[in-house]
Amino acid sequence: MAALKKGKSLAADLSERLQLPEEALFGAAKLSVTAGRRILIENHCGILAYGREYIAVRIKGGQIGIRGDELRLLAISGKELLIGGSVRNIEWS
């Protein structure tokens, strides 16, 4: 096997070689924000806290905290979570 390119993680290198996104290979969370009004979280592990000003979502290896106004859950499935409202801050830990 060829050596890793300098500065690349094993996950990033494998992802590049297989031409697949890291989240597909390792179940990592993927977060997409649309105009500060909608957030799609893929590969979530459940909701930890839910309120109109703060929503916390568990992800593999941590959590995502969303602060804003009039936050609400628009849709949820086993893998995806769609949140609407006016997003002010996103914390990834």
Image (cartoon, helix red, strand yellow):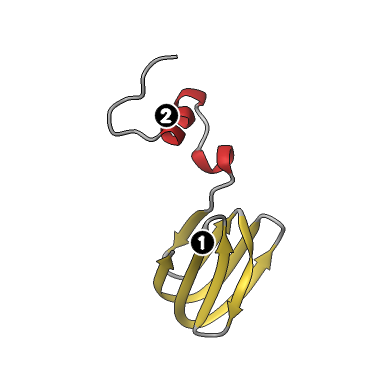
* Image position, residue 28 (x, y; %): 54, 48
Looking at this view, name the residue that lies furthest to the left: 6
Q: Which mark is residue 13?
A: 2
In which quadrant of the rendered image does the C terminus lie?
bottom left
The vertical placement of 85 against 3, above or below, is: below
The residue located at (43%, 32%) in the rendering is 10
Residue 86 rendering spot, x and y as whole percentages: 45, 77
Where 72 sits versus 57, above or below? below
Local secondary structure at mark 1: strand
Q: Earlier in the sequence, mark 2 or mark 1?
A: 2
Q: Which residue is mark 1?
A: 62
Q: Looking at the figure, which quarter contains the N terminus?
A: top left
Residue type at mark 2 is Asp
Q: Amino acid at mark 1?
A: Gly
Q: Under tag 2, what secondary structure?
A: helix
Dot 2: few (<14), some (14–19), or many (≥20) neighbours within 10 Å? Answer: some
Q: How many marks?
A: 2
Q: Residues within 10 Å of mark 1 (few under 14, many from 20)?
A: few
Residue extending farthest top = 1
Q: Residue at x 28, y 34 (%)?
A: 7
Does residue 59 appear left or right of residue 88 in this picture?
A: right
Q: Residue at x 28, y 28 (%)?
A: 6
Q: Position of residue 37 (x, y in %)?
A: 47, 70
* Left-right relation of 52 to 17: right
Q: Which quadrant of the structure image shows residue 58?
A: bottom right
CA gap between label 2 and label 1 equals 23 Å
Where does the image place residue 36, in percent across and percent down from the top left?
42, 69
